[in-house]
Image (spheres, rainbow, N blue to C red):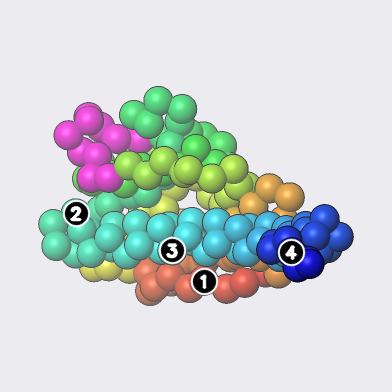
Amino acid sequence: MHIKYALGFSIVELMLVVVLITIVSLLSVPSYNAYLKNSQSSILSTSLTQTLARARSEAIKQNIPVTVCSADVSFTDCDTQSDWVHGWITFINPDRLTKPNQSDDIIAIYQSPYQVSLKASQTIATYEPTGFSESATANMTFQIVPNGCTGNHGRFVTIKNVGRVEVSRTACP
């Protein structure tokens, strides 16, 4: 008489694997959320830095002032709020206005894909044809904080007097 053994896993072995996968998943979720918050603030600060560098470059290239401002909901005009949460507009600004003269003056539009708080010390940043920041723009700061941020995942973006942009990490409030 031959006894046949069933091939495969027992129910106990299968349940043990399910429990282990659940525990590992639960432990990794907080780390993944922190990674997402850090990535969002990093990507947004990089996008803002690139926009400011392009505005500076365009001001020098075209020998005309170029302004970056917080966008209103329609992305056709500058917003008067210091919250840049919707995004921003870059435009040539020969008359030194607080909004684009016409739609042809707009160089670029950036719409933020993230739910973040982006507060600035001013509503517009202007670069002179020399590449230096306008006196009102000097030492302008932007604080980027993802919603639900904890830890050290915020960013500060600062426009220096000479027009150079610096990015630094900051603790979430």
Residue corresponding to mark 3: 46
Residue 171 seen by the camera: no
Give the residue displayed 62% in from the left and 47% down from the top. 117
Asked if residue 136 lies left or right of residue 24, the reply is left
The tag on residue 64 is: 2
* Chain part drawn in magenta: 99-108
Picture residue at 39% right of the left edge, 73% below the top? 164
Q: Measure how far apart labels 2 and 1 are at the Cα level.
A: 26 Å
In which image quadrant can residue 93 be found? top left
- Identity, as a three-letter code, of the amino acid under mark 2: Ile
Upstream in the sequence, badge 4 or badge 3?
4
Task: Measure the alpha-carbon separation of dots 3 and 1.
Answer: 8 Å
**Residue tagged 4:** 4
State the SS at label 1: strand
Q: How far apart, in angstroms, are the residues tagged by discs 1 and 4?
A: 69 Å
Q: Is residue 168 magenta?
A: no
Q: Are marks 3 and 1 in contact (CB under 8 Å)?
A: yes
